[in-house]
Structure formats: C-alpha cells, structure tokens
Image: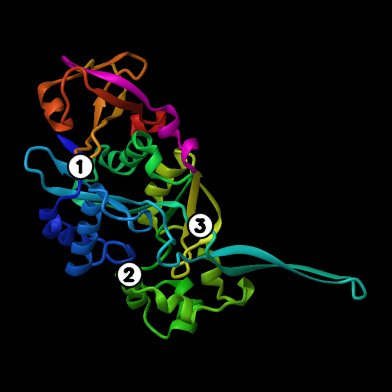
C-alpha cells in the first residue's frame, strides 16, 4: 500500500537515487549528498519546532507501507524569501508613445521580482518513473494540501509553485541561452545546481536591475516563456485542477511559469472534511479519496475508497496501520477531482 509520510534520516540514499533520475531541471533535488542531508535535517528540525518560520520546510516521501522505501518526494517551504531573496521574472508591459508621431507601442518586458516573498511554496515534486502508474502522482502532489488544511496556522495565505521550464534532452534551455547566459557566463546546468544547493547570491549580483524587452530575445526563448517541460505538464494540470493559476511570473533560469493560489481557495483545502475512522471493509462503490490522519509528527496520507459525505471512513486493519490511526480517530478526507478518478 502506498502512503505519504514525513522524510526520515535514513532516506538519504533513496533520495540520492531519486535525484539521479530527474535528468536535471529540478533545482531543489540535486545529486548532492551534503545538500540533501541538510534538507532532511532542516525538515526534521521543522517538525521538532526548533527553527524560525523563515527557515522552515517540510519534506514528505511516497513509500510502500510494506518495505518503507521512498519512491517519490514532495515538499513545502513555509515562507520563501524571508531569509534569502526569492527571485523570479514578472512579465509586464512598458508603453512607448508619441502623440506628435502618432506612435503607440506596448512592449512586453521581464522585470526581476521579489513579489512572492513570504508565500508558502510547493516544491521538489518527483516520482520514480517505475511508479508512475495508477494514481501515485495525484497522491504525491495533493497530499500536501491535506497537511496544510490540518495545520493551517503554520502556513502563509498565498501558495506558489515553480514549474520546470522547457529544455531539451541535453539540458539546453532556449530561455537560458537568450537571457541567463548573457549575464552569468556559465552553463545552465551549473547555475541550476548552484541555485539548488542554496548558493543564490550570484543572482542578485549578476542579474540586470532594469526591465528586459522580450522582443530582444530569440524567437525560441520568447516561445517558451510561461511554458512547462513536457514531463511537467501533468503536474501543472494537477495544480490547475486545484485552483492554481499562472499570473505572469516566470523562473529566471528557464522561463517556466510560477503558479499561485490563495491557500483557502485550494480545492482540496476548501472541500476536505473531518470524518471518524471506523474499522471495516471499504465500500467498492465509494469514490477514491485522499485520507489523512491529524497527527502532526506522524502524518500519513493514502488513497482509499471512501464516502466523503459520510460521518465515518471504513478502514481495514492494514489501512489503519498505514495511516497510524485507531477507530474513533479524526481523519481528513477529500475526493479526487472527477476527471482524476477516471484516469
């Protein structure tokens, strides 16, 4: 049975193996043992309430309840940009007009932005390709919303998610070639790695402080602004089904879109309900639901057939063990979106 759980100290080797399968482009999951170990340690300290909000971040893994092996990872940063600046480009417009010459031109621009400072961030979503059957991807991505709903006071009002932008199989990004390479004088992969390992000061030091005119970029770079890598398209669709939208902010490295949503408007947060755990067999005609316990340090989520409109959730002994719950415990339940139940 597949279940979401908090990351554990012994997961390092498994996370390194996952990082090796990303193919690059996932800055928060680099193939770097020291960085991943520090990420695990920070997550454990967050759960232990020993870090200030500016440093807090939660890491979850998808594991098989039989052998506890991590085959997927997802994370939440509590409040970005409060300690280290959090940058992206805002896609805007600059108007040039002359009444005398009867000329009016509205030109699209890219401006370095810190507008999402203080937002909570969904990040580090990756599922082992061998486990991308069924609905594991939905479980991995959406489990975070039940954690946010259970512990709402620990998160900010706005939630953002940076989507991986377009690059080819060799890791070449047309947006980087037309923008970043002009200012950083390094390969896309190196800048991506430095950012992923927390070395971000070079961004402020080297990026232009004035707007860039998009028309000066190559046609290839212009075409990928706000577009996602083909492998990231399903993740974008999952977030958009939950209410996230692209509001003209893009990644400074690859031009991928930043999606955002008010936390209380996220579908799984709005529509989730608290129900009582009860021992029994699942009803086969019940819709597939995300079911989470309310245990902060032993948080668990699984996909289980359940009636969200019923007062109780019937669980087998195996499911109760996987969710770390007992009869009578409170569970948070939300159905998958209608289109997700069919796929």
Q: Which residue carries the number 1 mark?
A: 5
- Point out the image quarter for the C terminus: top left
Tell me the magenta residue range: 262-281
Whether residues under marks 1 and 2 lie with C-beta atoms below 8 angstroms apart, the answer is no
Residue 116: mark in rendering: 3
Determine crowd level at label 1: few under 14, some 14-19, many 20+ residues with C-alpha closer than 10 A. many
Q: Is residue 234 visible?
A: yes
Which element carries disc 3, helix, strand or loop? loop
Q: Can you identify the residue that label 2 sits on?
A: 198
SS of the residue at dot 1? strand
Left or right? Give the position of 81 relative to 284.
right
List x then y, in percent, for residue 131. Answer: 20, 46
Describe residue 143's horizontal placement relative to residue 202 as left or right.
left
Tell me how far mark 3 sits from mark 1, CA to CA.
28 Å
Q: Is residue 122 above or below residue 188?
A: above
Label 2, label 3: how far apart the Cα atoms are: 18 Å
């Amino acid at each position: 049975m597949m279940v979401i759980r908090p990351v554990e100290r012994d997961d390092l080797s498994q996370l390194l193996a996952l990082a090796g399968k990303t193919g690059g482009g996932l800055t928060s999951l680099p193939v770097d043992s020291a960085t991943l170990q520090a990420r695990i340690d920070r997550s454990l300290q967050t759960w232990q309430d020993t870090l200030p909000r500016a440093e807090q971040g939660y890491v979850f893994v998808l594991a098989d309840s039989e052998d506890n092996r991590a085959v997927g990872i997802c994370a939440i940063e509590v409040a970005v940009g409060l300690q280290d600046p959090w940058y992206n480009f805002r896609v805007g417009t600059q108007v040039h007009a002359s009444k005398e010459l009867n000329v009016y031109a509205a030109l699209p621009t890219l401006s370095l932005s810190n507008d999402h400072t203080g937002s909570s961030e969904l990040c580090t979503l990756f599922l082992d390709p061998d486990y991308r059957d069924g609905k594991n991807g939905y479980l991995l991505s959406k489990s975070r919303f039940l954690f946010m709903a259970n512990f709402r006071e620990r998160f900010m009002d706005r939630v953002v998610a940076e989507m991986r932008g377009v690059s080819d199989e060799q890791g070449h990004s047309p947006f980087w070639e037309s923008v970043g390479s002009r200012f950083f004088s390094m390969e896309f992969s190196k800048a991506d790695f430095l950012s992923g390992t927390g070395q971000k000061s070079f961004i402020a030091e080297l990026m232009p402080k004035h707007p860039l005119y998009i028309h000066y970029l190559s046609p290839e770079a212009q075409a990928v602004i706000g577009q996602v890598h083909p492998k990231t398209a399903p993740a974008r669709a999952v977030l958009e089904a939950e209410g996230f939208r692209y509001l003209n902010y893009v990644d400074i490295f690859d031009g991928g879109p930043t999606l955002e949503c008010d936390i209380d408007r996220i579908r799984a947060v709005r529509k989730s309900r608290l129900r009582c755990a009860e021992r029994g067999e699942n009803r086969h005609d019940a819709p597939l639901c995300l079911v989470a316990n309310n245990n902060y340090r032993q948080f668990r989520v699984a996909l289980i057939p359940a009636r969200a409109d019923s007062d109780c959730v019937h669980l087998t002994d195996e499911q109760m063990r996987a969710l770390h719950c007992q009869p009578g415990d409170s569970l948070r339940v939300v159905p998958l979106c209608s289109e997700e139940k069919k796929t």
